[in-house]
Image (tube, rainbow, N blue to C red):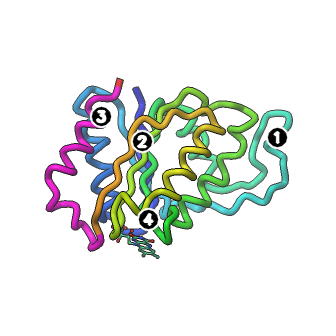
Amino acid sequence: MRVLGLVGSPRKNGNTDLLVSSVLDGASASGHIAEKLYLYDLDISPCVDCRRCKKDDFRCAVDDDMTTLYSKLEGADVIVFGTPLYWYGPTGKMKLMIDRLRPFVASKKLKGKKAILVTPSEEGPGACDCLVRMFELSFKYLGIDLTNKILVTAYDKAEVREQLETLNGAFEVGKALK
Ligand SMILES: Cc1cc2nc3c(=O)[nH]c(=O)nc-3n(C[C@H](O)[C@H](O)[C@H](O)COP(=O)(O)O)c2cc1C
């Protein structure tokens, strides 16, 4: 299987990055093909609601790095959505990316794929209700199956490195993929 990990935090080697990497390492250990992308390295413009993606070939009219990301998303069997909690939602960059998933509503090309949500936050899992609900409803709309939620309490950069059990748990989620 192909497993695509999206890091929606601006902090490389931060908590989201380390957790997503652990899931991907677990997936690789089980023989899956894993790839990680940093959303903050990509040029992702906002959806402009032109509705071009609702007809013909369902192509997005905006020309930026989403063009590459669209084909990577289509090619993945499992997508790891990694975002820290920012004001009880995802980061702006992750939200930009999610808004641009609109072509997949009509094309249905994400239907049947699995998703894993990875979110560290200062306040912990109890503060993630709105974020989780947003992902659950959006995935339902797209026909994506949310199989795991990895919600972790962590604030300082790379703090999660000290939580060996948590990192190991993320590794096991990746390893168990089938
Ligand atoms: C702009 C901003 C908003 C944040 N909002 C929240 C929040 O609403 N609740 C919370 O628990 N943590 C919040 N945090 C803390 C981060 O979720 C936390 O530090 C997380 O571990 C960062 O992950 P990273 O290392 O992958 O960037 C916020 C951080 C920033 C920079």
Looking at the rendering, the stretch of residues picked out in magenta corresponds to 155-177
Instruction: Kindly check if marks 1 and 3 are in contact, taking CB atoms under 8 A apart as contact.
Output: no
Instruction: Kindly check if marks 2 and 3 are in contact, taking CB atoms under 8 A apart as contact.
Output: no
Query: Crowdedness of circle 2 by 10 Å Cα count: few (<14), some, many (20+)?
Result: many
Task: Give the mark nearest the N terminus, 4 or 1.
Answer: 1
Comparing 116 with 64, the one in front is 116
* Amino acid type at image mark 4: Leu
Q: Residue at x 43, y 68 (%)?
A: 10
Quadrant of the drawing holding the C terminus:
top left
Select label 2 or label 3 by which is in front. Answer: 2
Q: Which residue is mark 4?
A: 85
Q: Residue at x 49, y 52 (%)?
A: 132
Comparing 82 with 29, the one in front is 82
Residue 54, numbered circle = 1
Corner quadrant of residue 57: top right
| Image coords of residue 15 (percent x, y) | 30, 62
Select label 4 or label 1 by which is in front. Answer: 4
Q: Which residue is mark 3?
A: 27
Task: Give the mark nearest the N terminus, 1 or 2.
Answer: 1
